């Protein structure tokens, strides 16, 4: 599967909460990390997603917010992945920040250079990658 989404996590659907229109799907991506996706019931049915099915969770880097530190937070964003900064690469205006998660996967965010400076992000720092469940696209192998 080729997509333009920078963050592509392969995992297993572990929990499905069904509602009349939408469904909430938790995807185990390893290392104790879960990604929650909010998708329509039609999409779930069309893709054949049910508990135990292997799925891809896709997240655009521009949808990921980065915060330094490890303290638990109360946020409305369902996805909060903790990791270590393994890369900060500045461009003309924006920068790419990559975090390595406990299970070895990497999540990448696109943030402004100003944000990297203000947050004082550096390689080796503990940080959080945060994104909403509605920013996650699910896919399956054809």
Image (tube, rainbow, N blue to C red):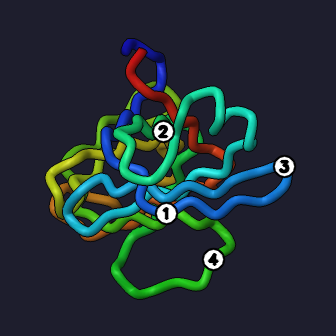
Does label 4 or label 3 sit earlier along the sequence?
Answer: 3
For the residues labelled 4 and 2, say whether their Cβ atoms are less than 8 Å apart: no
- Of circles 1 and 2, the one toward us is 1
For the residues labelled 3 and 2, say whether their Cβ atoms are less than 8 Å apart: no
For the residues labelled 3 and 1, say whether their Cβ atoms are less than 8 Å apart: no
Q: Which mark is residue 15?
A: 1
Gap in Å between the C-alphas at discs 3 and 2? 31 Å
Does label 1 or label 4 sit earlier along the sequence?
Answer: 1
* Residue positioned 36% across, 77% down in the render: 69
* Residue positioned 35% across, 39% down in the render: 54
Does label 1 or label 2 sit earlier along the sequence?
Answer: 1
Gap in Å between the C-alphas at discs 3 and 1? 17 Å
Quarter location, residue 77: bottom right
- Residue 83 x/y as whole percent: 26, 63
Quarter location, residue 3: top left
Q: Which mark is residue 26?
A: none
For label 2, the crowd category at 10 Å Cα-Cα, with few meaning under 14, some 14 to 19 and many 20 or more, is many
- The foreground one among 27 and 106 is 27
- Residue 16 x/y as whole percent: 56, 59
Q: Is residue 134 left or right of residue 142?
A: right
- Residue 46 x/y as whole percent: 64, 27
Q: Is residue 38 left or right of residue 30?
A: right
* Residue positioned 40% across, 38% down in the render: 55
Which residue in the protein does label 4 denote?
Answer: 75
Q: How many marks?
A: 4
For the residues labelled 4 and 3, say whether their Cβ atoms are less than 8 Å apart: no
Gap in Å between the C-alphas at discs 1 and 2? 29 Å
- Of circles 3 and 2, the one toward us is 3
Q: Which mark is residue 21?
A: 3
Q: Which quadrant would the N terminus be assigned to in this image?
A: top left
- The foreground one among 56 and 110 is 56
């Amino acid at each position: 599967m080729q997509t333009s989404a920078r963050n592509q996590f392969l995992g297993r659907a572990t929990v499905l909460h069904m509602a009349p229109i939408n469904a909430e799907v938790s995807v185990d991506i390893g290392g104790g990390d879960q990604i929650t996706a909010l998708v329509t019931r039609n999409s779930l049915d069309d893709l054949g997603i049910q508990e135990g099915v292997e799925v891809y969770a896709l997240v655009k880097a521009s949808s990921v917010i980065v915060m330094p530190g490890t303290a638990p937070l109360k946020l409305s964003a369902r996805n909060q992945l903790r990791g270590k900064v393994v890369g900060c690469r500045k461009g003309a205006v924006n920068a790419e920040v990559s975090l390595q998660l406990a299970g070895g996967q990497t999540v990448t965010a696109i943030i402004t250079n100003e944000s990297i400076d203000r947050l004082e992000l550096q390689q080796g720092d503990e940080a959080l990658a945060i994104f909403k469940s509605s920013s996650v696209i699910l896919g399956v192998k054809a």
